[in-house]
Amino acid sequence: MKSILSAVRFLVTACLCAVLLFSSVITPAFAAPNPNQPVKGEATEPAKTYERTAKDVIDKAGLRSLEEVTERAQNGAINEVQGTAGIEDMKRPSNSSGDTIEKKIKRGLEKAADTAKSAVQ
């Protein structure tokens, strides 16, 4: 009887050790990031372009000449460091449907003039 009990105890211990071993190996495998999904906080492509351009400017070890800045501006760059990174996301009159500040001021002045005329009459 004691020999059967010790054999069962050994098998139970071996099974528990195997379960502990495999559970500690499998859990990190499921926690590995999916290569198809971006990592939280990972930079977008325009941000990477911005960073790359900034590093190039810093590595150049000096200010650019006026000719270089003018040439870059003619190529559609937003500014010295940013270049064209994020230019499609930038709000400007060509891609915006909102009223310009001039139109808003003109409307406000016309409204004020109409109010003043009606108050005088």
Image (cartoon, grey):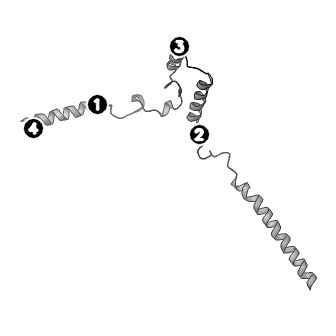
Q: What amino acid is labelled 1 in the image?
A: Lys
Q: Measure how far apart labels 2 and 3 are at the Cα level.
A: 32 Å
Give the SS element for disc 4. helix
User: Does 85 sit left or right of 33 as displayed?
Assistant: left
Of the two numbered discs 4 and 3 on the same chain, state the one appearing first in sequence: 3
Circle number at residue 67:
3
User: Does 92 sit left or right of 101 as displayed?
Assistant: right
Q: Nearer the viewer, mark 4 or mark 1?
A: 4
User: Does 86 sit left or right of 21 as displayed?
Assistant: left
Give the SS element for disc 3. helix
Of the two numbered discs 4 and 1 on the same chain, state the one appearing first in sequence: 1
Q: Measure how far apart labels 4 and 1 are at the Cα level.
A: 24 Å
Residue 70, x across and y down, in percent: 50, 16
Of the two numbered discs 2 and 3 on the same chain, state the one appearing first in sequence: 2
Q: Nearer the viewer, mark 2 or mark 3?
A: 3
Circle number at residue 119:
4
Decide which of 71, 107 is in the foreground and name it.
Answer: 71
Q: Measure how far apart labels 4 and 3 are at the Cα level.
A: 59 Å
Density class for disc 4 (Cα within 10 Å; few <14, some 14-19, many ≥20) is few
Question: CB of mark 1 within 8 Å of CB of mark 2?
Answer: no
Density class for disc 3 (Cα within 10 Å; few <14, some 14-19, many ≥20) is few
Circle number at residue 50:
none
Of the two numbered discs 1 and 2 on the same chain, state the one appearing first in sequence: 2
Residue at the limit of the structure toward the bottom, as seen here: 1
Kindly identify which residue carries mark 1: 103
Circle number at residue 43:
2
